[in-house]
């Protein structure tokens, strides 16, 4: 449930202080774009930032540098077996 | 790219493993609170490299596993009512209650939809105006804000046929209940990453102080987990107990204040039943009276039935960190991931499922 991959924000709509507006971002992860809700994200993201998504909601936003570090780590680990990682 | 190189080097793990060996200077038991951590620890093979003296036990952090059998029964009887459509996260589908599962209800004609997000459940309500859609809220602090935001959206857009059955739970209260039991000897907590992202690393400080408990908030990668275990062992070894956060890329000290605001608008603390742990005061969240029209328990006048645990299942003790799945006589014989008897085997984050998948030969 929690192995969230940061996704890049392509566009943002809505007013961060007004929950009656549609608080939505379009995000991209590995070329697939989708919409995520922004009602509960900790910091309102800008285009180019990254968000960690839980069940369709962005919960945390990261600046690009933090996110790239995170993504690289996830990709690397996905390609390794435990033996390779620990031997 | 700089960061790729930093992590591509697989020899990175070896020094961490060596460091962990050095850090463990006295026996210690660490509880990994979160089901995703349990899975990550197994998947990464970390249990096989733990130095002698360091023991990892799993805690009550799998939301499906701690859902009481009486809640499961209430979910199933609700799904059987005409005019009701139940929307759930997929993990709940096969969990047995006392009389079958939602999967069985679905095969006899009950309307059960698996959704990815509570917002999808709200969409179902809009698309099926003549049915009452009930989203089964099962989860911890990470899931609650999304449900709260969905109820707020339903309120703002005046959707009248959307409800939530909240069995939402909070983490610190059951940990307190566990830790106050002298039978459970725990020296440190591997604190959940994304729960802490919402409630803040600082949440763990009172527990650390009161129970002299080493606390480290961890991410889910091998390097994160190893680093956390090293810090936990050092805290215990040096008797320097505190809360440390090795997951700052997702977790701050004070947590996600925007999410907290949305949750506080919709929910208030309530006593909650936990499988294996019983009823714990203020360990759950109920929908405030102001939003009662979105509360399935109010709309459908639900009374929680008495329920018994599946016969012979030891999930209760496993969730308390008192037993391991291998101590259960049904483990891997009558209870398997294909034919689960208890919730700890059904859920993809359950401790029994983790042992079954990765740890049978240990
Ligand atoms: S192995 Fe099955 S029956 Fe035994 S405790 Fe785990 S879920 Fe329950």
Image (spheres, coloured by chain):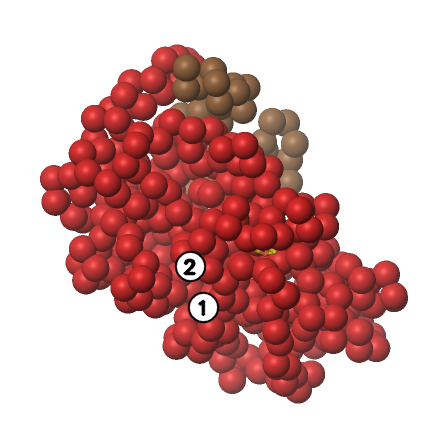
Chain colours: A brown, B red
Residue B143 seen from this side: no
In the picture, which quadrant includes the N terminus of chain B?
top left
> How many other residues sit within 10 Å of disc 1, few (<14), some (14-19) or many (≥20)?
some
Expressed as whole percent of the image width and height from the top left, the position of residue B101 reads 73, 63
Expressed as whole percent of the image width and height from the top left, the position of residue B216 reads 28, 44
Q: Residue at x 27, y 28 (%)?
A: B20
Whether residues under marks 1 and 2 lie with C-beta atoms below 8 angstroms apart, the answer is: yes
Q: Is residue A36 above or below residue B204?
A: above
The quarter of the displayed image where residue B120 is located: bottom right
The quarter of the displayed image where residue B21 is located: top left
Q: Which residue is drawn at 31% across and 66% down?
A: B181
Q: Residue B320 carries which label?
A: 2
> How many other residues sit within 10 Å of disc 2, few (<14), some (14-19) or many (≥20)?
many
Q: Is mark 1 within 8 Å of ligand 1?
A: no
Marks 1, 2 in one chain: yes
Residue annotated with mark 1: B277
Q: Which residue is drawn at 54% across and 41% down?
A: B355
Secondary-structure class at tag 2: loop
Chain for numbered disc 2: B
Residue positioned most to the front = B329
* Image-based side of B256 in relation to B165, left or right: left
């Amino acid at each position: 449930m929690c192995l969230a991959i940061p996704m890049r924000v392509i566009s943002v709509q809505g007013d961060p202080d007004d929950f009656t507006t549609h608080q939505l971002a379009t995000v991209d992860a590995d070329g697939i774009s989708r919409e995520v809700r922004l009602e509960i994200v900790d910091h309102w993201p800008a285009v180019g930032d990254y968000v960690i998504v839980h069940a369709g909601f962005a919960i945390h936003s990261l600046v690009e540098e933090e996110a790239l570090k995170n993504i690289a780590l996830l990709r690397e680990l996905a390609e390794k077996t435990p033996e390779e990682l620990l031997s | 790219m700089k960061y790729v190189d930093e992590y591509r080097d697989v020899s990175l793990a070896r020094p961490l493993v060596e460091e962990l060996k050095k850090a463990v200077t006295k026996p210690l038991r660490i509880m990994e609170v979160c089901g995703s951590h349990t899975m990550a620890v197994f998947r990464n093979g970390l249990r096989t490299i733990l130095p002698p003296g360091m023991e990892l036990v799993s805690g009550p952090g799998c939301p499906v596993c701690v859902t009481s059998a009486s809640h499961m029964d209430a979910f199933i009887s609700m799904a059987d009512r005409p005019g009701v459509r139940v929307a759930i996260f997929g993990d709940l589908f096969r969990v047995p209650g006392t009389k079958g599962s939602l999967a069985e209800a679905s095969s006899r004609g009950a309307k059960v939809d698996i959704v990815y997000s509570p917002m999808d459940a709200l969409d179902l309500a809009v698309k099926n105006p003549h049915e009452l859609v009930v989203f089964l809220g099962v989860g911890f602090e990470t899931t609650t804000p999304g449900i709260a935001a969905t109820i707020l959206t339903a309120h703002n857009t005046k959707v009248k046929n959307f409800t939530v059955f909240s069995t939402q739970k909070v983490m610190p209260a059951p940990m307190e209940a566990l830790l106050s039991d002298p039978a459970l000897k725990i020296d440190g907590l591997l604190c959940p990453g994304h729960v802490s992202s919402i409630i803040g690393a600082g949440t763990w400080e009172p527990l650390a102080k009161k129970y002299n408990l080493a606390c480290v908030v961890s991410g889910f990668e091998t390097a994160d987990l190893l680093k956390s275990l090293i810090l936990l062992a050092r805290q215990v070894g040096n008797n320097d107990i505190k809360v440390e956060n090795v997951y700052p890329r997702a977790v701050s000290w004070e947590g996600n204040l925007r999410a907290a605001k949305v949750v506080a608008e919709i929910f208030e603390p309530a006593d909650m039943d936990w499988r294996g742990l019983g009823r714990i005061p203020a360990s759950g969240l109920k929908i405030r009276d102001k939003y009662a029209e979105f509360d399935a328990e109010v709309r459908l006048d639900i009374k929680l039935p008495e329920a018994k645990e599946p016969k012979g299942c030891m999930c209760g003790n496993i969730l308390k960190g008192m037993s391991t799945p291998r101590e259960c006589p049904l483990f891997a014989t009558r209870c398997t991931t294909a034919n689960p008897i208890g919730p700890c085997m059904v859920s993809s984050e359950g401790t029994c499922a983790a042992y079954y998948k990765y740890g049978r030969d240990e």
